[in-house]
Image (cartoon, rainbow, N blue to C red):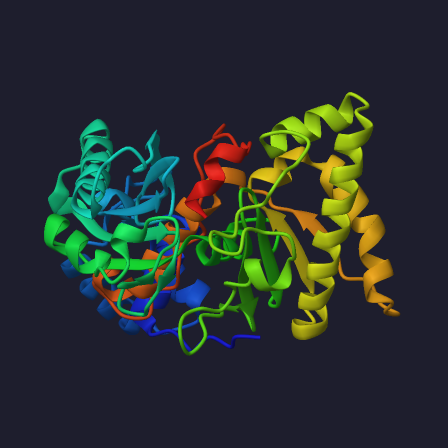
Amino acid sequence: MVVPSPLSIVARAALHLRDAGPATVTELSRSLEISRTSVENAVAVLIDSGLIGDAPVHSGSGAGRPARRYSFHAAVGTVVGVDIGVASVRVILADLAGRVTMQRTFAGVEDYVGGAAKLAAVIDDVRQTLAGASVPASKVRAIGVSLPGIIDDAGRVTLSVVIPEWSGIDIGSQLRQAFGCPVAVDNGVRLAAVAEHHLGVAQLVDDVIYLSVGNRIAMGLILGGRPRRGIHNAAGDIGRLAFRGLDTETGQIRWQTAATAAEVFDAARAGDVAAQGELDAFVDELAHGIATLIMTIDPAMIVIGGGLSGAHEQLLGPLRAVLPHHLGLPFHVPLAEARLGAEAAAHGALVHAFQRHNAEIYRIDDMPVPPITPLRGASAAVSESTEENE
């Protein structure tokens, strides 16, 4: 369990205005249980930072001028989350209160030749999204980036099987130069796990295995409430080791009765005996690998994301039934379907930007990551094609 450090008075005042709404100095003093003078000093700092300003005054029946109220200026800056893959690029924009204000999906980078062309396409996707939302580049406070591969703590791609042209490239630095703001880069599956922990099905659960099952199998870990990177930033890159039958070079899942997983699942639903047999064998092998991970990590929850989670109970029902036979344990580990679907990694990138560049985003210290609010009506459906991003 992560125990947060005590917040400064300035951060506590800003947090209250951000998450609870406008208030007067007297209301802040009462709610925060601190002196009026301390609140007035904090408010002065927040006004100077541009984070707060005057709120509409409530008209009252009493005599005298109404007390001055302050509100959080969420629209003063924008934070960007980007999920990069060969099949798609997703870009989301959020205000400083964590409310997603724009979300767009573009073609992936697969058809661009060379690492430079792929990066230029992503930069153009972000610029188009900003322009569509009428957000000038000067308002972008930070960018979070999700991409497939092993990423070091500085944002350099150590290795990417999916986008090999970027192996050894400091993508974070390239994007910092393009947009003139801080950039935080991490592995896509790890950031999908972060999103499910922060705003998805695994909220309040501190030890989580997030398993992305799509064209490949990959894992993201949340341990003690924090994403686990490992000393070499490779924690979770277990697909070809923990799960047998995958392509040893690419980690691709091999299907025999049809060309794609979607076709295998469709055929099994239609009563095809061979497809159902292949699906049963796949679920059994998946359960074997998950059991190995459970015995290694002892998590509180398993979250299944990725393209195949879109099969819902056709995959999860048999998996729940088979898993205990591989474990043989006297306790049950909950297995849940991911809530955010194909949008998980982009939202995780947004959370990552808020976590890594908190001071640059808010221009004060100690502000916690906001509760990210996705666009209302945004689809959480997942198709197999989206999972090349992970």
Q: Nearer the viewer, residue 66 or 202?
A: 202
Total number of numbered discs in the rendering? 0
The N terminus is located in which quarter? bottom right
Q: Is residue 91 left or right of residue 3?
A: left
Please determine whether, in this image, residue 2 is positioned above or below residue 345. Answer: below
Q: Which residue occupies 63% across, 38% down?
A: 255
22 in relation to 103, above or below: below
Residue 100, image x and y in percent? Answer: 37, 39
Q: Residue at x 79, y 33 (%)?
A: 276
x 53%, y 42%: residue: 215
Outermost residue, top side: 270
Nearer-the-camera pick, 190 or 117 = 117
Q: Position of residue 46 (x, y in %)?
A: 22, 61
The x, y position of residue 102, in whole percent, is 33, 33
Q: Is residue 64 visible?
A: no
Observer-nearest of 362 and 251: 251
Asked if residue 57 is positioned above or below residue 381 in the image, the reply reads below
Residue 150 occupies quadrant:
bottom left
Q: Residue 240 placed where, x, y %?
A: 56, 59
Can see residue 231?
yes
Residue at 36%, 51% in the rendered image? 147
Quadrant of the rendered image containing residue 241: bottom right
